[in-house]
Image (cartoon, rainbow, N blue to C red):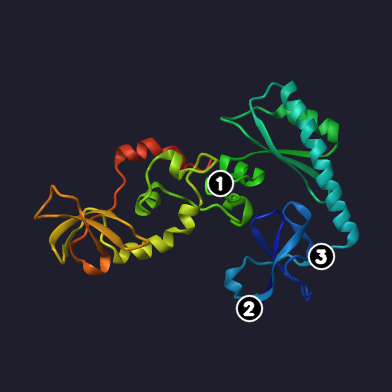
């Protein structure tokens, strides 16, 4: 077993593990640690706990120190600096006439590097821009192209549900989302209804999928043949959450479907949920992460 703490460097960002070096910390504490990018200051997201050695990548970097008032003040100064750096870089992009959109700027805690995050439709030759920025800021410059999902996470906003974006409020990492998930959850395959502000499939489809997968195990699918109290029929509509089903009766196929709860049905032959090729072609852009 190894004792660890989890540290996050951005709001709703990925949590990284460190050795607490015999110090007791609680969520919300600010700490200084060494990362692959250098010395960084982050917030404790996971308090001291023991986890199996197989669950971590050794060797764990040790905590340098709990952040001092001076460290926190320096972090705030960097935040202010990032705003002016953003404005200067935006101006330089216009001067160089580059087809790219600046999304965010990050000054590392040790001020050894400035990272510029941008989006673009294709590859951008920004070599002259890097030279120009390096001459202005006198430090290492890194330009990093990101996808539309990362852009939404950095900028934040409100989703179609009226709540803050999942990605910018509590989802630490993106996970693959597929068209099949939307179909299994009984959603309309209209891009407007299943895509987020970023133009990709909504993240909530992924973390709700497990519940729908369990419900599908006990619920006849659309197209399934079932036996009802009124005779045999075929499922034409289902509500996975309530368990209510609309059944077209074999004895009266032209009349309105009868409504039953799934507990009243006996499954004779289940159906399969498939995403048709033409549906996938129309919506494949929504599955992309970039």
Please indicate whether residue 164 sits to the left or right of residue 106 in the image: left
Residue 260 x %, y %: 24, 62
Relative vertical location of residue 147 with respect to residue 252 in this rendering, above or below: above
Which residue is rendered at x = 47% and y = 45% of the image? 201
Residue marked by disc 2: 1
Residue 101 location, x and y as percent?
Answer: 65, 31
Q: Earlier in the sequence, mark 3 or mark 2?
A: 2
Is disc 3 in contact with disc 1, using a CB cutoff of under 8 Å?
no
In terms of secondary structure, where does tag 3 sit? Answer: strand
Residue 35, numbered label: none
Label drawn at residue 159 = 1
Tell whether label 2 touches label 3 (CB within 8 Å): no
From the image, tell me which residue sits under label 3: 64
- Point out the tag, 3 or 1, that comes first from the N-terminus: 3
The answer to whether any part of residue 177 appears in the image is yes
Disc 2: CA contacts within 10 A as few (<14), some (14-19) or many (>=20): few
Q: Quadrant of residue 48?
A: bottom right
């Amino acid at each position: 077993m190894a004792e660890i703490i989890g540290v996050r460097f951005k709001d709703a960002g990925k949590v990284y593990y460190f050795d607490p070096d015999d110090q007791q910390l609680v969520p919300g504490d600010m700490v200084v640690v060494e990362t692959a990018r250098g010395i960084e200051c982050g917030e404790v997201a996971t308090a001291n706990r023991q986890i199996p050695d197989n669950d971590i990548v050794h060797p764990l970097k040790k905590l340098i120190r709990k952040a001092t008032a001076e460290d926190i003040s320096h972090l705030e100064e960097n935040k202010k600096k990032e705003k002016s750096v953003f404005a200067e870089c935006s101006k330089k992009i216009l001067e160089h006439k580059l087809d790219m959109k600046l999304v965010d700027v990050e000054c590392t805690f040790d001020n050894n590097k400035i990272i510029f995050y941008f989006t673009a439709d294709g590859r951008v030759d920004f070599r002259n821009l890097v030279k120009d920025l390096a001459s202005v800021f006198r430090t290492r410059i890194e330009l990093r192209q990101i996808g539309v999902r990362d852009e939404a996470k950095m900028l934040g906003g409100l989703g179609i549900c009226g709540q803050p974006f999942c990605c910018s409020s509590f989802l630490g990492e993106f996970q693959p989302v597929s068209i099949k998930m939307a179909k299994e959850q009984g959603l309309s395959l209209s891009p407007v209804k299943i895509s987020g502000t970023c133009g990709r499939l909504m993240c909530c489809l992924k973390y709700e999928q497990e519940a729908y997968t369990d419900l599908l195990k006990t619920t006849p699918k659309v197209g399934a043949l079932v036996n009802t109290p009124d005779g045999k029929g075929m499922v034409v509509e289902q509500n996975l959450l309530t368990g209510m089903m609309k059944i077209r009766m074999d004895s009266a196929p032209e009349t309105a479907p009868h409504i039953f709860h799934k507990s009243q049905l006996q499954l004779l032959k289940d159906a399969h949920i498939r995403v048709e090729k033409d549906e996938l072609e129309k919506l494949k852009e929504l599955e992309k992460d970039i």
